[in-house]
Image (tube, coloured by chain):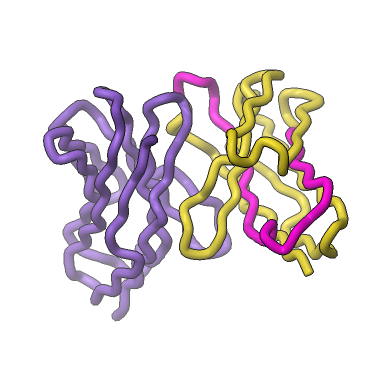
Chain colours: A purple, B yellow
Amino acid sequence: GDSVTQTEGLVTLTEGLPVMLNCTYQTIYSNPFLFWYVHYLNESPRLLLKSSTDNKRTEHQGFHATLHKSSSSFHLQKSSAQLSDSALYYCALDDTGKLTFGDGTVLTVKP
Amino acid sequence: DTTVKQNPRYKLARVGKPVNLICSQTMNHDTMYWYQKKPNQAPKLLLFYYDKILNREADTFEKFQSSRPNNSFCSLYIGSAGLEYSAMYLCASSRDRTNTGQLYFGEGSKLTVL
């Protein structure tokens, strides 16, 4: 079946440093859609980014990600972390009309 | 209004007792989902309604029931709670089956079974 792997369970950064959260996936389908969801404490999870076509970068709220089918990856990046970026980030895969989530990465940004 | 509301936010239940969780959305979305989220684990899809059609995941088929009396409401029912049901239950909706990636989540219902 489908699977999504987020290798880091916890990432701690100093404010101003770049962010990179890893996401790789497995699926038999040739045209999957990948997503990043962000879950701030005491709020609902919400969509942060949706993949576009292969090798095309998508951006939102300072974050960006590029779907690379050759490596089955959709890593989340940001050039400079802010304190307000501290949250739980999920990578998710949709290829059959249902979302499969990764285990999530807790990002903590410190001053 | 793009909110999904869940009630109750917190539920304490005894082992063997039933639990009913409620979700509502006013976006006229066709599809509503229930996910189970345990600490350090991925949200796990339990079931979803596309319009009036209920789809339950194979490994949770007999553990959870659901109803959708109208487009706006969807419930999750546990007939006899066990300790393993303690989790956060997230309801979500999406506009239609072709846009399933863009889910709108509620804040969750945290169930503790004692």
Q: Position of residue B109 (x, y in %)?
A: 69, 55
The percent position of residue A76, horizontal first and vertical second, equals: 25, 51
Coordinates of residue B42 in the picture (x, y in percent): 47, 53
Q: Residue at x 28, y 42 (%)?
A: A25
Q: Is residue B24 above or below residue A40?
A: above
* Magenta stretch: includes residue B89: yes
Read off the magenta span: B74-99
Q: Is residue B1 visible?
A: no
The answer to whether A84 is drawn above or below residue B107 in the figure is: below
Give the mark count: 0
The image quarter in which residue A100 lies: top left
Residue at 78% from the left image edge and 31% from the top image edge: B67
Whether residue B19 is visible to the viewer of this picture, yes or no, is: yes
* Residue A9: image location, x then y, percent: 35, 65
Q: Residue at x 56, y 59 (%)?
A: B38
Rendered residue at 35%/47% (across/down)? A91
Q: Is residue B69 left or right of residue A71?
A: right
**Residue B70 located left or right of residue B54:** right
Residue B107 higher or lower than B23, as above or below: below
Q: Is residue B61 one of those drawn in magenta?
A: no
